[in-house]
Amino acid sequence: MQVLKRVRPIGPVLAAAVLAFGLIVAPAAAQEGPSGSNPTAQSVNEQQLLQELNKIQGRITIPDGKAATLEQPRGQDFRSFHEGALPWIGGIAVLGMLLVLALFYFIRGRIRMQSQEAGVKVVRFNALERLTHWVTATAFIVLAITGLNFVFGKRLLMPLIGPDAFSGWSQWAKYAHDFFSWAFMLGILIMAVLWVWDNLPDRYDGRWLRVGGGFFDTSNRTHPPAARFNAGQKLIFWSVIIGGIALSVSGLFMLFPFAYADVNGMQLAQTIHAVVGVLMVAVIIAHIYIGTLGMEGAYEAMGSGTVDLNWAKEHHSVWVEKQGAKTESSQPAAPPTPAE
Amino acid sequence: MARMKFLCDADRCIECNACVTACKNEHDVPWGINRRRVVTINDGKPGERSVSMACMHCTDAPCAAVCPVDCFYTTADAVVLHSKDLCIGCGYCFYACPFGAPQYPRTSNFGSRGKMDKCTFCAGGPEADSTEVEYAKYGANRLAEGKLPLCAEMCSTKSLLAGDGEIIAAIYKERVTQRGYGSGAWGWQTAYRETITV
């Protein structure tokens, strides 16, 4: 702009000369400021810096290192994801899963045992397995409720109870989220060690998946063979392990803010945590359904730790055979199976 | 009503940090918290510029949008303020803020950061104006006394301007026209979706 203003008063001949030597002459003319130079000629330019790096970094004289980031417009992307896509992803995942399960329940109904109870119990999960499951489960439910509060609380709960009560609850919810996370992380680790061996893919998985585990056979007669865990349970297991590790790692970044990441890393951690979190809530809702209301006899396995022999034969035939072989060889007085 | 804005004329800023000190002193800001800071870009190289930065009091503020407890509000002067009674210290506002304005005391165990603190444009908080309780939580309320932010008032080179957006933009325009250069209104495009064209 300044160049043009200075060019205008000079004659047409000079103007032509300026045009001819444009590249050389223009900066020279611009340098004739009041102090004899144009300090902006070489100066850093905000728009240019933002275009090059999408962030402006400098040097500061205070110990807080993250204050050296002058501008990070990526905060706008964090905002648009957090307030735009995230509530939709979460809402569709959670409500969608509830809707699918409700439809399944009303159309298909409860998955019943086909045969009568044998009256003989088989140990399915020992005390350590059940303890691990319920510690992780309790922690997850607390984490799920307090986590969903971060996304949906201000939209659903705050209008009902008012900002002060909602803030008080959210403060405790945040503390609970921070502290229960440790139980959850420990649970995930122990669970992985306890069950990974029985959750490796085996030759029964293909058939189990092809017939949909017998979920869609309303006569309850389809029972594809399965070892200790069928393919559906393996899918749950691996979702929990992979999702749990993703939640744990991204969560640790947030438990120690800025210890391992800069502001963009923190944004990424929060985004991953939120998306994996709402998807895990949906997966666990399905898990809770099939473990309680959805299937007769399923809850006992994790509740008391034992299941009826005939239930085990229907759902985990290969596992029962192996268990039977073990018991018969070690204990001669194995409980006989009553005739049907 | 005025639309309050900050403008740092980077061609005048000499990184003396008087704005930072004035702010800390005026509001009795705790140790470890900087409501305002001076960042030097390309330090020691030709074209180096220093910019004094605090909360820019954005139009449609991202911090307010992401807050899970909706503790932010905008005053009639377009100053973005928040309630420390409602804040739960989750840290989302810092992730969303383009200028790194939100600050958290007590960085202790498991990310429990304490109530967020940031520049109030010397306008206090939701408590009654110029009360002790307001001062303890948010610092001085100079706007209520008819004064503008102290950082800008203290600025030795009058680099930092604070006040009605149209007035400070006119001052900046006049400067640029007179001296013949200007590296622009830093942060304005991001904060206000507009910049000053000279």
Image (cartoon, coloured by chain):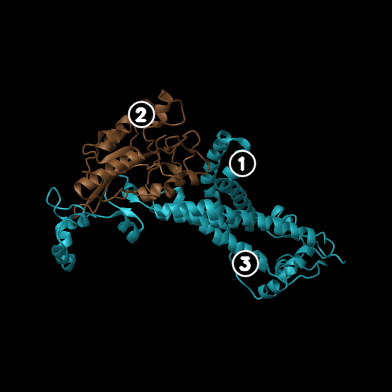
Q: Is residue A126 visible?
A: no
Whether tag 1 and tag 2 are in contact, CB under 8 A, the answer is no
Chain B, chosen colour in render: brown
Please name the residue that numbered disc 3 is placed on.
A198
Q: Amino acid at mark 2?
A: Arg
Name the residue rendered at 85%, 64% in the picture.
A338
Chain ID at mark 2 = B
Chain ID at mark 3 = A
Name the residue rendered at 82%, 59% in the picture.
A119
Q: Is residue B97 above or below residue A92?
A: above
Please name the residue that numbered disc 2 is placed on.
B142
Front disc: 3 or 2: 2
Chain ID at mark 1 = A
Q: Is residue A77 above or below residue A328?
A: above
Whether tag 3 and tag 2 are in contact, CB under 8 A, the answer is no
Q: Say left or right for A286 vs B154.
A: right
Q: Say left or right for B168 vs A161.
A: left
Q: Residues within 10 Å of mark 2 (few under 14, many from 20)?
A: some
Please name the residue that numbered disc 1 is placed on.
A157
Rendered location of residue A116, percent (x, y):
85, 62
Q: Amino acid at mark 3?
A: Asp
CA distance for labels 1 and 2: 36 Å
Q: Is residue A24 visible?
A: yes
Rendered location of residue B105, percent (x, y):
39, 38
Q: Are marks 3 and 2 on the same chain?
A: no
